[in-house]
Amino acid sequence: MNLAGDPLLTERNPLPATLDPRIAAQLTFLIEVDRLKTVLRQSPLVAAQRRENDAEHSWHLALMVILLAEHADEPVDVGHTVKLVVVHDLVEIYAGDTPLYDDVGARTQEERERAAADLLFGLLPAGQARELRALWDEFEARETPESRFAKAMDRLEPLLLNWMARGGTWQTPGVTADVVRARKAHIGAASAVLGETARIILDEGERRGWVRSPEHTGDGRPAAPPA
């Protein structure tokens, strides 16, 4: 059962009862995380007229880690960092996506995601449950070079999608260029080069009017506070 009380996906067509219990648990988890493909994010795709889903996002981050790790300020283990970005959004299967500029949803995000992590990773054999939970906890804590770089990629990827959309979620009511800058600070914290890259892209987006300047929220409401 998930947080909403829905049955596991395998209950729709149970696996053969004769399977090895460890393999059955692993396959149950792998089938359950198919739900990640249905969790929609706010970021628009570049190549299609729809929003990105969490599985697509995680794949894109993994590729970004492979290509951009050379720009990390601290040496990072690329393989470990790829594990972090592949695992980091799995909890949203049960907790749902919390958009970057959703200050209301952010109030309960940690509680929802920790409950989801307990339930989802608990489907695995004990050793693997601990391993994946440790990866998720590491990403959230941002106390290692790999987790800091993983978080940077998590903030850089939607910036690229919003640039290609000529605004995208930058057009969220109450959001200004300074709000975006504050919430993209994780990029520069892990890579000065990529932080400067993000700054150039965002500054040009502001110049073109794709994100509001700080003095113009565009809807009469105060700008959202930085996170």
Image (spheres, helix red, strand yellow):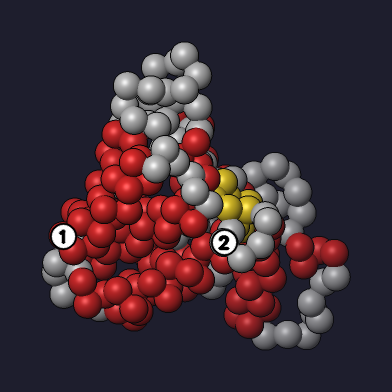
Depth order, front residue of 191/31: 191
Figure quadrant of residue 223: top left
CB within 8 Å, label 2 to label 1 = no
Residue 174 left/right relative to 198: right
Residue type at tag 1: Ala
Q: Residue at x 47, y 22 (%)?
A: 218
Give, as a three-letter code, the residue at label 2.
Val
Question: SS at mark 2?
Answer: loop
> Mark 2 = which residue?
46
Whole-Å distance between the Cαs marked 2 and 1? Answer: 26 Å
Looking at the rendered structure, the secondary structure element under dot 1 is: helix
Residue at image x 52%, y 62%? 57
Q: Residue at x 14, y 69 (%)?
A: 74
Residue count near mark 2 (Cα–Cα under 10 Å), binned few <14, some 14–19, many ≥20: some
Q: Residue at x 44, y 41 (%)?
A: 210
The residue sitting at the front extreme is 208
